[in-house]
Image (tube, rainbow, N blue to C red):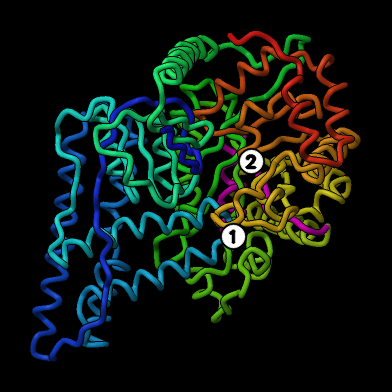
Amino acid sequence: MTISISGTGISRGIAIGSVHRLEKGEVDACQTAIPEHLIEDEIARFRQAINTARQQLKSIRNRIPATTPADITDFIDTHLLMLEDSLLTATPIELIREHQCNAEWALKIQRDALARVFDEMDDAYLRTRVDDVDHVVKRIHRILVGQTCEEPEDGDLQECIVFAHDLTPAEAALLHHQGVAGFVTESGGPLSHTAILARSLGMPAIVGTHGIPYQIRDGETVILDGAEGLLLAGVDNMTLAKYRARQQQQQQRACNLKRLTNEPAVTIDGVPIQLLANVELQEDVEAARIAGADGVGLYRTEFLFMNRSDIPGEEEQLQQYLDILNALQGLPITIRTLDLGADKNVSSHASGERISPNPALGLRAVRLCLKHKELFRPQLRAILRASASGPVRMMIPMLSSARELDEVLELLAVVKQELNQDGLAFNENMPVGGMIEIPAAALTADLFARKLDFLSIGTNDLIQYTLAIDRTDDAVTYLYDPLHPAVLRLIKLIISAGRANGVPVAMCGEMAGDPRYTRLLLGMGLEDFSVQPTSLLEVKDMIKRSDIASIKATVDRILQQDDPAAILPLMATIGATPAA
């Protein structure tokens, strides 16, 4: 009997292999009182657990070949750096002394405090960074309770499909090195570090299955379809043959796409399209350049502000921007200003800012920056100074009103005057744009287009706010629909507002990087895409096989639909051409 399990596909592709279960018991951290004369012994036990965790991660890193790309081993290095952070190494010791409690409980208290900080972050991608904290904390907890951390041993895992409750980035990287075909986990989301790593490695994967049936035995052959988020077991030979044929076709297609790296993104009817990359770390820039990106359409600056007790100064920010510019070797970059919520690190510099009961609707992004200009001004100065060294654009996130924009532009004018007085170079005409990701901003996009040099559609938040769902919440992710008529009409409204005012409009959300929507967006008039480097060639291929003139009639019909169910059949007919 065929067993079908659905989850969230986080990395496309088809994997066929035998099941290998990776069992890791969950640790229940309970509070235990520690007598005062044993407190130092408890602290020593905690420190030893930290050292053991560090040794385990270094061992994993050393087992991964030196030829492995840096962006892959960086995920392990991130966890190693966390083991040097006082928030995880020193604060629990203070809690052990303060509460006279066991190390497990002190670590849990600190983990929960850090989780609240991440929960206050407005960017869905950044909120999922708490996964990294959890991975490190769970490793330390298992060591404290004497539970063996079951790292996969070097052995014959070729073409296996791993089942696990969860996987750390370190485990995923090591599994890839051992030839694992793909993995399925009960927990996790599409924005976790493990998910990003799976996409970078090209390893098909499904997360959020909420229970993997134990009637699927170890060693049984299963099919994993990452694109559909589907796991099949107990299949017949005909089904197996069908998926093997699809797997070979996908592998051949991936090889064919590489020939497009240095080709321009131009449609069949001669419309040039700009293909940019979304990056957050300097290592991502190399991946973007290898994929043939025209530049960086979204550089997230939040990582400079995270996992630290202080706020980076102007000089530190400037150096980071200059390093990215140098790595781009003349390609343009769009730097997004700080997009954080009222989290603990920022609030500590803002006279005890209260925690918002709803971070997504609270003091965040440009609202936060305008309220705390001591946070915003150094970043504006650093971005402006970087503009003297290369093609830099600045982008303001989460705009909701023209008043907010006017206040930003007024502050920017003041900062320019200060730089002139200080004798510091900058590009007086540095382009300034805004992210349109709130329905209010989309409905008044023409107001922003008249005041800005460019617009960029942030579909991730635009869809969430329009449909009132949190795409990181498993209970409602099924409602996250980029093809909802309301979403499509808002996107079209923004693009039209840009065109009417002679202002370019880009898209930097995940929708831009999904080739299923490329032709739809082209037909709506989008000519600037900013995507993850791993998606760039697929999107370019779709662009080069598209004729916008022949697409527009179908796209217009799609935009007239009121029923989401009527849109899917039309999507299948948009300018179909043979695959490359």
Q: Can you say whether 279 is above or below 261 in the image? A: below
Does the rendering let one see residue 251? no
The quarter in which the N terminus is drawn is: top left
Q: Is residue 473 left or right of residue 553?
A: left
Q: Is residue 100 left or right of residue 233?
A: left
Q: Is residue 573 left or right of residue 301?
A: right
Q: Amino acid at mark 2?
A: Gly
* Residue 266, image x, y percentages: 69, 14
Magenta range: 376-401
* Residue 181, image x, y percentages: 33, 28
* Residue 135, image x, y percentages: 32, 55
Tell me, yes or no, whether the highlighted magenta stretch contains residue 515.
Answer: no
Which residue does the numbered mark 1 point to in the structure image?
A: 122
Tell me the CA gap for discs 1 and 2: 15 Å
The part of the image, by quadrant, that contains residue 551 is top right
Q: State yes or no: discs 1 and 2 in contact (Cβ < 8 Å).
A: no
Q: Which mark is residue 509?
A: 2
Q: Amino acid at mark 1?
A: Asp
User: Which of the marked residues, 1 or 2, is nearer the chain's N terminus?
Assistant: 1
Q: Which mark is residue 113?
A: none
* Residue 192, image x, y percentages: 44, 48
